[in-house]
Amino acid sequence: MAVKGRPRPEAGARSKRETVLDAAVTLFLDRGFDQTSMDAVAAQAGVSKTTVYAHFGDKVELFRAVIERGASSVDFDLDQATLSSVEDPRERLTRIVAKLLEATTAPQHLALLRVLTTEAARRPELTEAMRTLGVPHVVDLVAAALLEDGRLHGYTLPDAHTYAALFVRMAAAGLQMDALLSPGPRHDSAQLTAHARWTTTLFLRALRSQDPEGLPEAPLHNASGAFPWGEPPPTD
C-alpha cells in the first residue's frame, strides 16, 4: 500500500542530500543561522532550491539535520570504542571519554556550538538540536560500563545513568569549556587520552572504595604546575 507524503528518494539522492548538508555547514558556520537562506544553501551546493526543499522542509529542519549528522558520527566513533574486545570497563570508559573529547573539542563542533548557543536564545525550536549536540548516547555507553565494573568489583549503583551523566560532566566539561573559550591550539590525542585515563581512574576508585573518607584528594596541579594527567594515573 502506497504511503502519501514525500516521494521515495531516487538513486543518488543521498549524495545530493549530503552535498546540501555540506553546503549548509559551510554557510551556517560562516554566516550564522539567520543570515543563511535556503537559496544560498542551494547555490553553495550547486543544486536547485527545489532539491533542497525535497530533502528538508525548512531551514530549522536543515539545521537540525546538520547537528544530527555530526552527532551520528560521534556515536559511531563511540560505538567503535566499546567493541566487545575491550573487556576491562576502565579501559572502555577511558576510550569513550577520549573519543568524546576528540569529537567535541574539534573546531567544527565548537563552531556549531557557538552558532547554536547564539541562536537558541531567540529560537526555542532549536533547543532540541542543542540536546542532540550533547551526544546523549554516550551516557548509555558509560552506564553500561559502570554496571559491569560494579559487578566485577562488588558495588551497586542505585541509578547508573545518573552516575554516568556525572562522570561524563566530570571527565569532559572542563576541557570542552577550555576549547570553546580559548583560541589557542587544541590538545593532542595523547593529552586527551591521558586526561580520560586519569579521570576514569579517580572516578572508579571512588566507586570501588568502601571508605570514601579515606580517599586521597585529587590535585588540581602537580609540582611543575602542569595538570595532573601529565603524570601516570594513580594505581588502585
Image: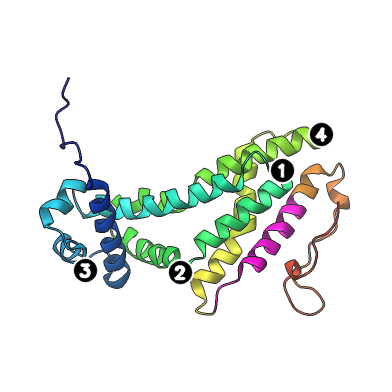
> Foreground mark, 3 or 1?
1
The reply to whether the magenta stretch includes residue 131 is no
> Which three-letter amino acid code belongs to the residue tagged 3?
Gln
Q: CA distance from mark 1 to mark 4?
A: 14 Å
**Residue 155 in view in this figure:** no
Among the 4 quarters of the image, the one containing residue 63:
bottom left
Q: CA distance from mark 2 to mark 3?
A: 21 Å
Q: Nearer the viewer, mark 1 or mark 4?
A: 1
Q: Secondary structure at mark 1?
A: helix
Residue 107 has which mark? 2
Residue type beneath disc 1: Pro
Query: How packed is label 4: few (under 14 Cα within 10 Å), some, or many (20 or more)?
Result: few
Dot 4 corresponds to which residue?
154
Q: Residue at x 56, y 40 (%)?
A: 140
Label 2 Cα neighbours within 10 Å, binned few <14 / some 14-19 / many ≥20: few
- Gap in angstroms between the C-alphas marked 4 and 3: 56 Å
Say which label, 1 or 4, has the lower sequence index.
1
Q: Which residues are magenta?
A: 185-203
Report helix, strand or loop for mark 2: helix
Q: Quadrant of residue 224?
A: bottom right
Q: CA distance from mark 2 to mark 4?
A: 41 Å
Question: Which amino acid is tagged 2?
Answer: Pro
Query: How far is mark 3 from mark 1, CA to CA?
Result: 46 Å
Q: Which mark is residue 35?
A: 3
Name the residue nearer the viewer: 135 or 177: 135
Q: Which mark is residue 89?
A: 1
Verify CB contact (< 8 Å) between mark 4 and mark 3: no
130 relative position to 210: left or right: left
Q: Is residue 55 left or right of residue 26?
A: left
Foreground disc of the pair 2, 4 = 2
* Of callouts 3 and 1, the N-terminal one: 3
CB of mark 3 within 8 Å of CB of mark 1? no
